[in-house]
Image (tube, helix red, strand yellow):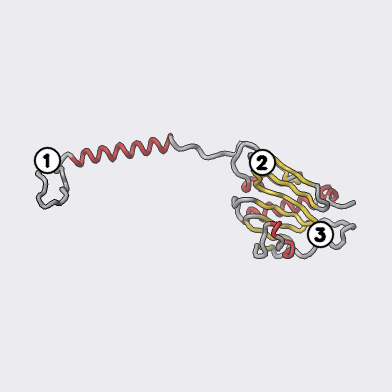
């Protein structure tokens, strides 16, 4: 037998009625639950927007320095267009910002500096703190947000200075291990004869 709410007299004690239907209610509740599940599945498949993609090709040179695109890619976000903005207006500095859809996402710079690698890393402009990981040979220091490398390049007109390469990202993206590979490749690229000569005073 099926009882509906109209077949049950209100409780004189004021208690809320429970189990208004002995049979049939479960069927209706089950149907509603199934309909809700199907609606959720359909909406999940068709209502959610696809994740953003990279519609640009990663360049095979980082600010003019030959670097494997696969080493740069982990630090570049999805977007439609990539752009590079070099700035050589400051003597002794070679600056370059990388932008995606008009937003700066990475910088790759070189600068003549005095002092040890740790002293250079202490400069807040480099984006690498003194507690970052340093390689045993004291040539590289890095975190997920950036890295610094000592370039094997000398300038007779700067006997007390050394050329330092740096890479900095604006948001956490790649891993620390990936940053180590990127700053190593960028530093070695800057040490090439043509790039080293381009950064000398001569």
Q: Which mark is residue 162?
A: 3
Q: Position of residue 28 (x, y in %)?
A: 22, 38
Residue at (81%, 50%) from the top-left corner? 90
Residue at the image point whose x is 69% and y is 40% from the top: 83
Q: Is residue 109 left or right of residue 46?
A: right
User: At numbered mark 3, what does the secondary structure look like: helix, strand or loop?
Assistant: strand
Residue beneath label 1, please?
A: 3
Q: Tell me how far mark 2 sits from mark 3, CA to CA.
A: 30 Å
The answer to whether the residue labelled 2 contacts the one labelled 1, judged by CB atoms less than 8 Å apart, is no
Measure the alpha-carbon separation of dots 2 and 1. Answer: 69 Å
Q: Earlier in the sequence, mark 2 or mark 1?
A: 1
In the image, what residue occupies the spot 74% across and 65% down? Answer: 119
Note whether 178 is above or below 133 in the view shown. Answer: above
Look at the image and tell me whether residue 70 can be seen. no
Estimate the x, y position of residue 87 in percent, counting from the top left: 77, 46
Q: Secondary structure at mark 1?
A: loop
Checking the image for residue 58, the label placed there is: 2
Residue 114: where, in percent of width, then height? Answer: 80, 62
Q: Residues within 10 Å of mark 3 (few under 14, many from 20)?
A: many
Q: Quadrant of the N terminus?
A: top left
How would you rate the neighbour count of disc 2 (Cα within 10 Å): few for under 14, some for 14-19, many for 20 or more? Answer: some
Q: Is residue 77 left or right of residue 84?
A: left
């Amino acid at each position: 037998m099926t009882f509906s709410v109209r077949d049950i007299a209100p409780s004189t004690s004021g208690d809320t009625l429970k189990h208004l239907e002995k049979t049939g209610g479960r069927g209706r509740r089950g149907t509603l639950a199934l309909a809700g599940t199907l609606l959720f599945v359909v909406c999940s498949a068709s209502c959610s927007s696809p994740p953003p993609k990279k519609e640009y090709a990663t360049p095979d040179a980082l600010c003019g320095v030959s670097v494997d695109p696969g080493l740069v890619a982990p630090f570049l976000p999805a977007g439609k267009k990539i752009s590079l903005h070099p700035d050589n207006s400051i003597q002794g500095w070679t600056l370059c910002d990388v932008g995606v859809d008009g937003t700066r996402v990475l910088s790759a710079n070189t600068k003549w500096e005095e002092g040890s690698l740790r002293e250079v890393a202490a400069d807040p402009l480099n984006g690498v703190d003194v507690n970052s990981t340093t390689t045993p040979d004291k040539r590289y220091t890095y975190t997920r947000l950036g890295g610094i490398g000592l370039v094997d390049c000398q300038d007779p007109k700067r006997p007390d200075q050394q050329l330092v390469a740096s890479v900095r990202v604006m948001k956490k993206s790649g891993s620390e291990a990936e940053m180590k590979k990127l700053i190593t490749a960028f530093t070695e690229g800057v040490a090439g004869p043509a790039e080293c000569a381009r950064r000398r005073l001569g």
